[in-house]
Amino acid sequence: MAGLADEGPHTRGTHGEDTAWAEELLDQLRSTGRDLGRVVDWLARAVAGTVCVRDDAGAVLAGDPVPLAAPLVADVLSGRISSAAVADGGRHVRLVAVRHRGPFRESTGVLAVARATPFDRRSAEIVTRTAPVVELLLRERELTAAGRRLRRATADLRLAILQLLMVEDTVAARRVAAGLWPGLLDTDTASVYVVEGAAEERDRLVDACIEATGGRALVVRCPAMDRHIIVLSPATTAGEWLRPLVDSRPGTYLGGSVRQSLAQTSLAYGQAISALAVAHFRPDQVAVYAERTQPEALMDLVALRAWSADVLRPLDTLPHHTRAELLATTRLGLEYTAVSTAKVLGVSRNTVRARMDRVEALLDTDFSDLAVRATVHLALNTQAGCAVPGGPVSVAGAPAVRLGGLLAGTAIRTWAHDLLDRLTHDGRDLRGTLRAWIGAGANAERAAQDLGVHAQTVREHVRSAEPVLERQLLASGSDLYEVVLAHLVVGDLSEPVLRRTKPGQSDAAVHR
């Protein structure tokens, strides 16, 4: 083997020499064609050889592997020489150092070119001139990768802040947000919006949400639903900023919450999801939670608060953080599946189930009963404050009240009858099917056996009831629980058992 270490890259070409290759090389730097693989392929054709770009660890970054002598490569990588020419039998190889910045340090790679014939002046100059282009493309590749890592880290940080807010840890959320978004969470209240669009368009829609809100919102890719984007903003005009995104994009929907304290972000998220369901039935594809009368707002607020406090009293002995964690998890767990709740909160689904099992045990009830779930959901939302837009209501001295008493008021009864009477205009017995389906725990097969029809008929009836009621029923959540409450109000369902009878316990303590 014979080798020659070059002093450095050539800087001059022969006067009158064919330089068409130089124009071709410059073309590789056009914005529409910059690609390391393309440059390597071009170089291989230009010098009629095999080309390889390796990093300092020996990994091939582009091209085809070229066998190289380790000592010579080490000299190039160490900077002792910047280039070299090697003749090895019938093979001729040229090596040029290419420097670029890696993720954590400046790195040196090797551009290696091998061919069967010796390098003439033209081919040697092409190799030398191509090396800086390779360096530029390597740096561009690393900058692009760094940009992707930064965007991913920023997105992860946004999600972490949202997850902290979901479990009412506002202090930690503010600390995390202060570094990148100073002042964003320096507020007591905020609204949550959920934008729904095509999953394949979500990245572009996220960028559009960030641009529309001008950095004055926390924009998060929903970890549970790949069509959803969660936007939390303290600005009162956030809905106006986001609405044009829906107007200009068919198949895009927007649901928003009323303003809530930051500690009640999980509540606001549930409201936004509920409003999003309504948006699917609106011509403008936009809905805000406050636009629809909520059943709890039609009840006696003092009595409702007293009842909710009584239902959830078994959790009052827990430390504040533990209690808040259990309540937030249960609120979301009653709205969505354990898997979706786990993704939103950033915990495992087993953790979600364990927390809900603990609440179920403390309340001594059965969450498999749909009426129980709806009733506990009402108590959780009430205690969180969403039923009292004007602020906390004192329950001191309020008389004990049962669920039946809360649901006996004129306003709530009128609401329930008006809601369910919508189903009577259909020639099918949608109301009877829906009542049986709810009574069967939203199980179509059991409801079908009770009604003597096919399970698919039950599903079709329930699905047909959704646009009539303007509520999503097949997905468990606030919409379904409102319809369950309506059935409880009109007497189509029995009051749920929230505290099961124990020896020596009176019947009055059973139904809450």
Image: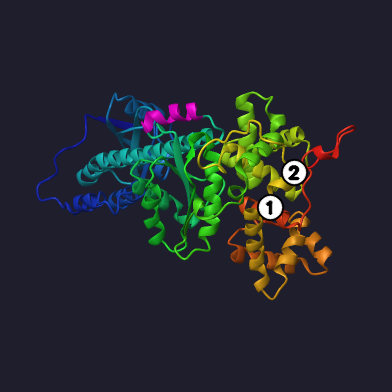
Give the answer, above or below, for where 347 lies relative to 322.
below
Residue that lies at the very extreme toward the right in this rendered image = 503
- Estimate the x, y position of residue 467 in percent, counting from the top left: 59, 65
Query: As rendered, which of 214 and 37 lies closer to the eye?
Result: 214
Q: Type of residue at label 1?
A: Leu
The mark total stands at 2
Left or right: residue 174 compared with residue 368: left
Q: Answer whether residue 108 is magenta in the image.
A: no
Q: Which residues are magenta?
A: 170-183
Asked which colour scheme the image uses, the reply is rainbow
Estimate how packed mark 1 is, as few (under 14), some (14 to 19) or many (20 or more) residues with alpha carbons within 10 Å: many
Q: Answer whether residue 178 is magenta in the image.
A: yes
- Estimate the x, y position of residue 387 in percent, counting from the top left: 57, 44
Specify the quadrant that holds the N terminus.
Answer: top left
Real-space CA distance between mark 2 and mark 1, rounded to the nearest whole angstrom: 15 Å
Q: Are marks 2 and 1 in contact (CB under 8 Å)?
A: no
Tell me if residue 92 can be seen: no
Q: Residue at x 70, y 51 (%)?
A: 408
Select label 2 or label 1 by which is in front: 1
Left or right: residue 389 compared with residue 88: right
Q: Residue at x 34, y 35 (%)?
A: 110
Residue indicated by mark 1: 485
SS at badge 1: helix
Specify the quadrant that holds the C terminus.
Answer: top right
Q: Residue at x 39, y 61 (%)?
A: 247
Q: Type of residue at label 2?
A: Phe
Query: As rendered, which of 310 and 54 lies closer to the eye?
Result: 310
Quarter holding residue 338: top right
Give the main secondary structure of the magenta stretch.
Answer: helix
Residue indicated by mark 2: 367
- Estimate the x, y position of residue 107 in percent, counting from the top left: 35, 30
Estimate how packed mark 2 is, as few (under 14), some (14 to 19) or many (20 or more) residues with alpha carbons within 10 Å: some
